[in-house]
């Protein structure tokens, strides 16, 4: 069997960036991906009208039974979302976990909001005394953010906000009618309303076409007009000739040599359920936060009886997530009876309300840190609001039409804080159909996060009032897991007794093992994770290249070309 | 920029294709295409002609189906717009066929629909709901549709009406006719980010 320089587990944002960087540096990489290669022409149906789908987008009863919700719908092939790798939850934990294990992972469908984190995030502990600072500063990360933005293309504006460092941007998308109305209301509320940082191409960029604003991005883009690993990263790796991709290869265990160093990975072939071993000089876990922890916790050996690189006991601990919920929904009477506006194509958030709490004084509110809001609404593909209108007949039909351009809603994105109660471990009894011990999730929202949620509900109701909207209600917070923004489990820090990885994502205990996903993050922030996963994994990958060049991973000389 | 132009072209072809999809023998008024049935290499083929055959219900009895047709059309009837143009309703959009398809493919819905239709007939004795003359069904439906007119003894009817109205809306507004009636702006190509056109009126007052 071939031996590789590096095995990378996962091909999403972190894995994809690592693979590209290592291959371009001449290292020979084998990537293991738990699912199959997706074919946008067949697997994504985002350019189909509802009447071109058998169940008109409402899914067959059989599909509805297994659907995890979210984008697991008739618009994508059923096996695009993971249904076979089981996980368990501790009593009292509700965890909804839509996993895309197709090549490219969640980047195929992500929300595309791409704001930089800043020192207000990295040094938050110094400001409010809670938990610990990240082992990096914004000055360390800024160059990586810039390179990532220039590579993937992010549309936004320079905003000079203390919570949101500005970056290098393509022209922002234009505000729609509802954005101007909300903006005017937000001004009265004294809260910001600004163009989001959208990784969606407003002009052709680096050989990728500009967005055509069809509005169904969350069912997958088949022209690659927003960043995804299969469109942006993996082709660059293939071009080098140094990349081998093994699909339907479910990583089970990181193998170690007699010194306890990584020597390869054992994986299960999804279709044959056969176990295969592959060897390399270094291993990168980028399977996404919880799955990375599962693989490492299941990597038990004489040297690592509780999981590889777990001398700190912190492996799988410190799980954080974003609380998502609709803090308010209703409609804008200003737009009643207006013609349908193409400017209400509603898939992109286009604008957001970035964190405005606890900026000058970190303890101004009843909670620490802060949350952000995303607006939604406009002329959707289906008039869901029709349920809220009484009646039938001509008047009912007319009211559905009159209300069509008016719906509006706000999603709260509130980060949980580190807690001893939130972690993953290996289920002592249950195994999945591949024979692998299941990961077990322990999670509940902490008080601070619930206070943010309460605050966001009040802010939202006030905003509805100030923008002249009609407030109709709010949802309960979604289950944890729903946001797909889980962080922690392999946190980075300088002290090997307290952290699994160092500031470069390298395992303290096992120098040829790295983590390159959000598992290394200290916590969630009010920003989304993908842009930071890209920036951190780029930095980690370049560090790995340096280590190879320095002979740290008993490397053969980097290959030519 | 290599791959860009062809892929844009292909995309346009795919969009054109969407409305010309193959038909399913069961339906007379609406068609769909399963993605796997659409062969991307045959964009140039002539569109499949959609046959307007008489529809045979898959789940409902002929009498029940007649009631489904009448009720769906009362909920979303054809209407006239301001310039006396006919705006099609449930009948033209084939909503009854959609409901029959959805109910026939989901056994868990079947008792609710069967019992609900029976309830409607019982409440319209002796002729049955579908045979009521024009004003009579409206009086009954108003009692089911408006909270202020609800009767304690008609809970079953109210619940069924809500369910039936939901499926009528689902069927109508996912049909081509329904989406066109809303002028759904998505799934089209825009050369640039479409923006608000109400310059100088950010609050959109008095549109």
Image (cartoon, rainbow, N blue to C red):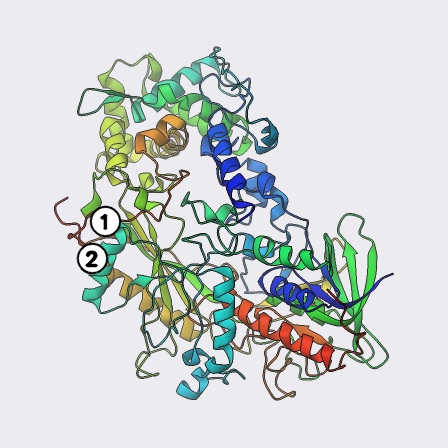
Q: Are marks 1 and 2 on the same chain?
A: yes
- Report the side of A558 relative to A135 (left or right): right
Query: Mark 2 — residue?
Result: A467
* On screen, residue A201 above or below A121: above
Q: Position of residue A318 (x, y in %)?
A: 56, 76
**Based on the displayed image, in which of its 4 quarters is residue A44 positioned?**
top right
Q: Earlier in the sequence, mark 1 or mark 2?
A: 1
Query: Mark 1 — residue?
Result: A332
How many marks the image carries: the answer is 2
Q: Position of residue A249 (x, y in %)?
A: 74, 55
- Answer few, some or many: residues within 10 Å of disc 2's Cα (few below 14, many 20 plus, some between 14 and 19): many
Q: Given the image, what chain letter belongs to the residue carrying mark 2?
A: A
| Residue plotted at (24% across, 29% down) | B142
* On screen, residue A104 above or below A18: above
Dot 1 falls on a residue whose secondary structure is: loop
Q: Position of residue A155 (x, y in %)?
A: 40, 59
Give yes or no for contact between labels 1 and 2 (Cβ–Cβ under 8 Å): yes
Q: Position of residue A9 (x, y in %)?
A: 69, 63
Question: Which label belongs to residue B111?
Answer: none
- Report the side of A239 relative to A365 (left or right): right
Q: Does residue A526 show up?
A: yes
């Amino acid at each position: 069997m071939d031996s590789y320089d590096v095995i990378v587990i996962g091909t999403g944002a972190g894995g994809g960036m690592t693979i590209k960087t290592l291959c371009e540096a001449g290292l020979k990489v084998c990537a293991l991906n738990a699912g199959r290669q997706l074919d946008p022409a067949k697997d994504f149906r985002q350019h189909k009208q509802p009447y071109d789908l058998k169940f008109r987008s409402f899914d067959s009863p059989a599909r509805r039974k297994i659907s995890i919700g979210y984008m697991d719908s008739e618009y994508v092939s059923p096996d695009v979302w993971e249904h076979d790798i089981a996980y368990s939850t501790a009593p009292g934990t509700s965890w909804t976990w839509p996993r895309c294990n197709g090549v490219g992972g969640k980047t195929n469908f992500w929300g595309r909001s791409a704001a930089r984190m800043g020192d207000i995030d990295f040094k938050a502990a110094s400001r409010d005394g809670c938990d610990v600072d990240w082992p990096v500063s914004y000055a360390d990360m800024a160059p990586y953010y810039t390179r990532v933005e220039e590579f993937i293309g992010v549309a936004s504006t320079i905003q000079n906000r203390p919570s949101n460092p500005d970056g290098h941007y393509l022209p922002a998308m234009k505000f729609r009618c509802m954005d101007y109305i909300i903006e005017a209301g937000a001004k009265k509320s004294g809260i910001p309303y600004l163009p989001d940082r959208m990784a969606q191409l407003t002009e052709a960029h680096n050989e990728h076409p500009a967005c055509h604003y069809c509005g169904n991005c969350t069912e997958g883009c088949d022209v690659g007009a927003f960043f995804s690993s299969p469109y942006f990263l993996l082709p660059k790796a293939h071009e080098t000739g140094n990349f081998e991709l093994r699909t339907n290869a479910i990583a089970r265990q990181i193998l170690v040599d007699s010194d306890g160093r990584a020597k390869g990975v054992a994986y299960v072939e999804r279709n044959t359920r056969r176990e295969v071993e592959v060897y390399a000089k270094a291993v990168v876990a980028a399977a996404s936060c919880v799955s990375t922890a599962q693989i490492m916790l299941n990597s038990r050996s004489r040297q690592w009886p509780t999981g590889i690189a777990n001398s700190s006991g912190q492996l799988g601990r410190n799980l954080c997530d974003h609380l998502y919920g609709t803090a308010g929904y209703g409609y804008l009477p200003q737009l009643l009876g207006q013609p349908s506006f193409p400017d209400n194509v509603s898939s992109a958030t286009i604008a957001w309300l970035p964190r405005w709490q606890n900026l000058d004084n970190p303890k101004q509110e009843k909670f620490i840190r802060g949350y952000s809001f995303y607006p939604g609404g406009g002329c959707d593909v289906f008039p869901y609001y029709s349920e809220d209108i009484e009646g039938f007949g001509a008047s009912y039909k007319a009211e559905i039409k009159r209300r069509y351009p008016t719906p509006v809603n706000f999603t709260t994105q509130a980060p949980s804080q580190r807690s001893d109660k939130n972690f993953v471990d290996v289920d002592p009894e249950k195994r999945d159909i591949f024979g692998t011990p299941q990961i077990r999730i322990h999670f509940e929202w902490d008080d601070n996060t619930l206070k943010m949620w309460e605050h966001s509900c009040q802010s939202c109701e006030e905003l509805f009032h100030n923008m002249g909207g009609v407030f109709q209600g709010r949802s309960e917070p979604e289950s944890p897991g729903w946001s797909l923004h889980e962080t922690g489990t392999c946190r980075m820090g300088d002290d090997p007794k307290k952290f699994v990885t160092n500031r470069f994502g390298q395992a303290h205990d096992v120098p040829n093992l790295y983590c390159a996903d959000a598992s290394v993050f200290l916590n969630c922030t009010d920003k989304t994770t993908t842009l930071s996963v890209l920036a951190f994994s780029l930095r980690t990958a370049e560090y790995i290249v340096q280590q190879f060049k320095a002979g740290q991973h008993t490397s053969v000389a980097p290959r030519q070309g | 920029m290599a791959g860009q132009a062809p892929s844009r072209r292909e995309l346009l072809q795919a969009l054109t294709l969407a409305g010309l999809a193959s038909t399913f023998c069961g339906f007379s008024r609406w068609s769909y295409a399963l993605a796997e049935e659409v062969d991307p290499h045959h964009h140039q083929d002539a569109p499949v002609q959609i046959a307007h055959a008489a529809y045979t219900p898959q789940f409902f009895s002929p009498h029940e189906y007649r009631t489904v047709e009448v009720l769906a059309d009362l909920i979303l009837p054809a209407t006239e717009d301001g310039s006396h143009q006919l705006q099609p309703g449930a009948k033209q959009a084939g909503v009854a066929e959609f409901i029959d398809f959805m109910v026939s493919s989901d056994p868990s819905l079947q008792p609710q629909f069967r019992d609900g239709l029976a309830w409607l007939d019982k409440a319209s004795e002796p002729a049955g709901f579908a045979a009521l003359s024009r004003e009579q069904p409206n009086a009954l439906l108003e009692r089911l549709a408006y909270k202020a007119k609800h009767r304690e003894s008609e809970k079953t009817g109210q619940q069924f009406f809500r369910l039936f109205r939901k499926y009528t809306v689902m069927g109508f507004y996912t049909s081509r006719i329904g989406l066109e009636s809303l002028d759904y702006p998505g799934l089209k190509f825009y050369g640039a980010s479409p923006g608000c056109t109400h310059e100088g009126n950010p609050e959109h007052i008095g549109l």
